[in-house]
Amino acid sequence: MKKTMVMLSAISLILAACSSSTTPTSQQGSTSGTSSGTPAAGGNSGGKKTLEFWYIDPGEKEKVYLEAVERFKAKHPDVEVKTLQTPNDTYKQKFAVAMTGGNPPDVFHSWGGGWLKEFVGQNNVLEITGQFDSSLYNQQALANATFDNKVYGLPLGLSLSVFWYNKEIFAKHQINPPATWEEFLNVVDTLKQNKVIPIALANQPKWPGAYYLMYLADRAEGPELFNHAFARQGRGFDDPGYVKAGQYIQELSKREAFNKGFNGIAYDAGQGRQLMYTGQAAMMLMSNAFVNNMRAEAPSFEAKLDFFPFPTLPGGKGDPGNLQATTAPVWSVSKKSANPDLAIELIKELTSLETAQAYSDRTASPVAINGVTYKDVYAKRLAEMAANAKAMFWPYDQTLPAELAELHKDTTQALFGLSITPEEAAKRMEEKAKQILK
């Protein structure tokens, strides 16, 4: 079935944050080399050429990356690779400072889309068009790192956002996974009546809550709503569809569907996930990064875990199979790298079939690499959902220009906190869009 993909500047592709993204709990250097935080633009260390490699993921994802680094080093014994793992939200700040200061790593994690395009526009990312076999990659995923027909990154993972839930709690209270909004609200009410937090939310970084706005807007009006607002093609961010999405968010907040203080809880620290692991909360809307975190933090919880897609809305125009998706990681090379050819070889190893197969098998993730046989039960089911989806839509905060993306997160967080009306949030977004988007 042909998919209509929600595109943007470069037709971003698939599957956090929110953001999503996998979220480590600490910053650390790896065994591949002690990182001082000083990039490898210098080019050599102790007689060896040096590459600096930054990424965000902990757990099994990190292990997969480091195994790829070791394979690369075996092929290039004259190269030292210094690695640095930094939590998601901290990484974004640290990387922006490194880029601005002219000290970026040689190889770095991105999400493609607008986030990467901003650095491309600053002439800070190396173009790699024609220096890899494009047939190895999902072309829609590759498009997420392609701007003006020039490629600036290679995608590895595909991330899909769904509702993860505790099967044991659902069975205990005779609850079935809801398919419609009415059924979803009934689940929320039943859980509250039984003193279970319906939904765990850690929304201090703002992107976890943004999943709700994106899904609700899509379920209400379909992917065309964002496409038109972004491209300035008649409908704007003050469209009734966005007002309706805000109203649904506030319906959940007023119903006390979330844990107390959710807007002040950091996601990276794992407090929200702990509510799931300990049985205090029954559901969480999150990317499949949740599985990677869970296997590292509370592997015994996997026996209780399952997922269901975001429910439909009454009278909604969006297809129930549409998915919020992100490409992550996308590996890119700094234009300041002193060893660009070696850096390109490293990102090719980081997206090789061997790397992709291990990534899928061990992190429950679909991938953007052709030829992988899905063995992990979660990865297989998610990949099937992706194959059947009529549309994918990408994180607004990774697609919109930075100032508008930040306002999107601010206003969405305020909607959850009931400190702004849906009409006012939509009005502010449209006013800023008129100033920024052409």
Image: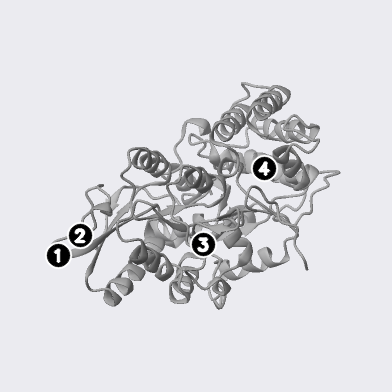
Label drawn at residue 267: none
- Which badge, 2 or 3, is on the more N-terminal residue? 2
Q: Amino acid at mark 4?
A: Met
Residue to which mark 4 is pinned: 214
- Which badge, 1 or 3, is on the more N-terminal residue? 1
The image quarter containing residue 374 is bottom right
Q: Amino acid at mark 1?
A: Gly
Residue 330 screen position, x and y as percent: 48, 57
Element under disc 3: strand
Residue to which mark 1 is pinned: 47
For the residues labelled 1 and 3, the Cα–Cα distance comes to 32 Å
Residue to which mark 3 is pinned: 155
Q: On screen, 173 above or below 356?
A: above
- Which badge, 2 or 4, is on the more N-terminal residue? 2
Element under disc 2: strand
For the residues labelled 2 and 4, the Cα–Cα distance comes to 45 Å
- Which badge, 4 or 3, is on the more N-terminal residue? 3
Residue 114 screen position, x and y as percent: 56, 45
